[in-house]
Amino acid sequence: MSELRFKALIDSQKRGGKNVEEKGRRSEYFGSHVFNEDKMRQFLTKDAYESVKAAIFSGSKIDRKIADQVAEAMKCWAINMGATHYTHWFQPLTGATAEKHDAFFDLFHDGRALEKFGGGQLVQQEPDASSFPHGGIRNTFEARGYTAWDPTSPAFVYGTTLCVPTIFVAYTGEALDNKAPLLRALNAVDLAATAVARYFDKNVSKVSATLGWEQEYFLIDRALAMSRPDIVMTGRTLIGQTAAKGQQLDDHYFGVIPSRVLNFMRHLEMECTQLGIPVKTRHNEVAPNQFELAPVFEEANLAVDHNLLLMDVMEKVAEEHDLKVLFHEKPFAGINGSGKHNNWSLATDTGVNLLSPGSTPMKNLQFLTFFVNTIKAVDTYEELLRSSIASASNDHRLGANEAPPAILSIFIGTQLSNVLDELEGVSKGKLSPEEKTELKLNVVGKIPEIMLDNTDRNRTSPFAFTGNKFEMRGVGSKTNCAKPMTILNTIVAKQLNDFKKEVDVLIDTKNLKKDEAIFNVLREYIKTSKRIRFDGDGYSQEWEKEAKKRKLSNNKTTPEAIGILTSKESSALFKAMNVMSEVEVKARQEVELEAYIMHLQIEGRVFNELVYGYVIPAAIAYQNVLLANVSGLKDIYGEGFKQLAESQMAIIGRISEHVEALKTKTDAMVNERKKANVITGSKAKADAYCHKVKPYFDEIRYHSDKLERLVSDAHWPLTKYRELLFVK
Ligand code: ADP
Ligand code: MG
């Protein structure tokens, strides 16, 4: 091992001993840093409290006087908590969060100092955020964007800053962020699902989408991670011979959590608890140094904010433990990558989970209604849903035999498949009394109340029903959940609207009873959405063939996948559901394409640096050692050296071959990159990066990894996989 690497490794063992004491019972300090209901009751007048509650429940406007009161109360509370600054916290299209801090501190006209934070500052801000991606919506010369308070996600104090969750919009009204479209989609699904839920219970006046994400990530010693230019610049290793031992022994999965990691987790969970993020489970994942964290599910907007906040907090806490978190979907070749399952359901304000089977046939009819409509929605818009999880980094993972393929399908298990099959056989139009009884007792009535433990589990399905919720499994570990959640809730909203119309027509014109009408429409949906249901092995080649026959989309790369965003059907959908205008959708597509290009561009540059700056010099240095050895042998043994130097000569030759190949491939890649860079039009440019530049990456890696095996460990300059992945 090279001296430098050896020293780094030994140092890494000395770090991270930081022990963390529990602050007490978590239930006692849960949300202590959040301006939540409790604090609102405590700090707000009754009028102000009710006004904020109404805004949360129905989206009603908060008038300026009330906003002043809320701001004053928030300020007092936050200063008490040690805050000195405030920020509007928002989600630009980069996928991360952004903030711009301002001090509460201000001056009176006469120069005296005060702490100031009024309704104006709470409700609206104008960050000079002109460098955020906007896909052409906002010309820097014309209009600036502004952030506006989202009262449905409570403000919180993080460190010494009061953070106010906000949307980010252009003055012309277009959303420049991921939150505004999400809020619109959640509103659409609320209206649509409430109308349908009222077939079953007139007391329902609001339906919220719920989201429970599961965040996977890698933890690496910080200094070792920093020693790799590729991890620093791209979040993943671009080259690296896989370690002798990967995940084949399954000894990491659910294994004992190393104490250094445990300290990190405990610290992280304490921070999360204060911030009101209801973290619940932690465990080792499949790959070495890979872990997962999952909270109790929440209303979707809040859950999205909490996931973004979590990712931020994770990075900060990791730093304190000399660790680095990798959120990249595929940081290491040869072992599993990371995803972020999105568990999703719909809940009424009467406390019912609409995707949970109940104890009576009527409750089960309600369950089936939402269940079948979700299936139908995913069937109609499978390609659009797939587009919502597309990114350069997630392309590495989808379909890589560790994650669902790029084909969307739904797994529902045998029991529910049987129920749907039976429902499909129900006759059209009016039902005879016998048929009705049969249906209620033997079909709908047979669905067990608690499906959770009864559902067979299929880990290869991208969209699986897991007892009382659907689980979307293709979401990338880095992805902002707002993206898939916006699309999923929009398509379900549209579907439920269509359903309601169809049922009402049958009731009004065909004289059918409500449940007969519902059965009739559901039966049609079951028939027409069959192709999306698949219970087999989603990772298999046969499924790819079968899916093609079923005309399901299979868009393997991001440029392909996001084309659908601007199709006629998608535009019409977004418009009808008031989620995005054509301009907003186009802008998002543009931003995604640009992000894709930039990611590959950076990777290409880093490849170049690694090959010329590290790999080739190391190979040549070691080759020189061999050459010296050979010429030494020749000096001493004369012609007899040939026999003695056979192996050395062979290795010298192989090194030269790989160096030659590396140079050729890298230069060719750079050349393609130059050609791609001058292409105008982001789609054509992204395509060039995808099909002309990217294919070289694997080839370069191949030769570099061969050299890593040939070159002496002492000469290898880059921290190796085994050093990155097995350090406790
Ligand atoms: P897995 O078997 O996929 O690891 P887990 O039991 O770890 O599943 O996680 C289940 C996830 O589902 C949790 O994050 C939980 O909060 C979430 N969840 C449970 N019920 C709902 C629901 N009604 N809506 C949304 N998410 C839910
Ligand atoms: Mg899961």
Image: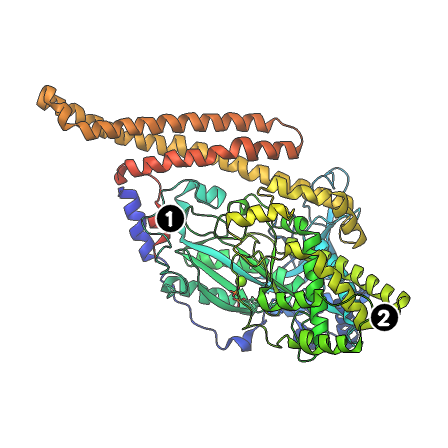
Observer-nearest residue: 26 or 72?
26
Q: Is residue 116 visible?
A: no
Q: Residue at x 47, y 66 (%)?
A: 282
- Mark 2 Cα-neighbour bin, 10 Å: few <14, some 14–19, many ≥20: some
Quarter location, residue 323: bottom left
Element marked by disc 2:
loop
Q: Amino acid at mark 1?
A: Leu
Q: Does 514 sit above or below residue 700? A: below
Closest to the observer, 57 or 663: 663
Residue at disc 1, secondary structure = helix
- Residue 112 disc label: none
Q: Residue furthest top?
A: 639
Q: Which residue is mark 2?
A: 512
679 and 74: which is toward the camera:
679
Q: Residue at x 55, y 52 (%)?
A: 476
Residue on which disc 1 sits: 224
Q: Is residue 69 above or below residue 288?
A: below
Q: Position of residue 298 (x, y in %)?
A: 63, 68
- Sequence-wise, the earlier of marks 1 and 2 is 1
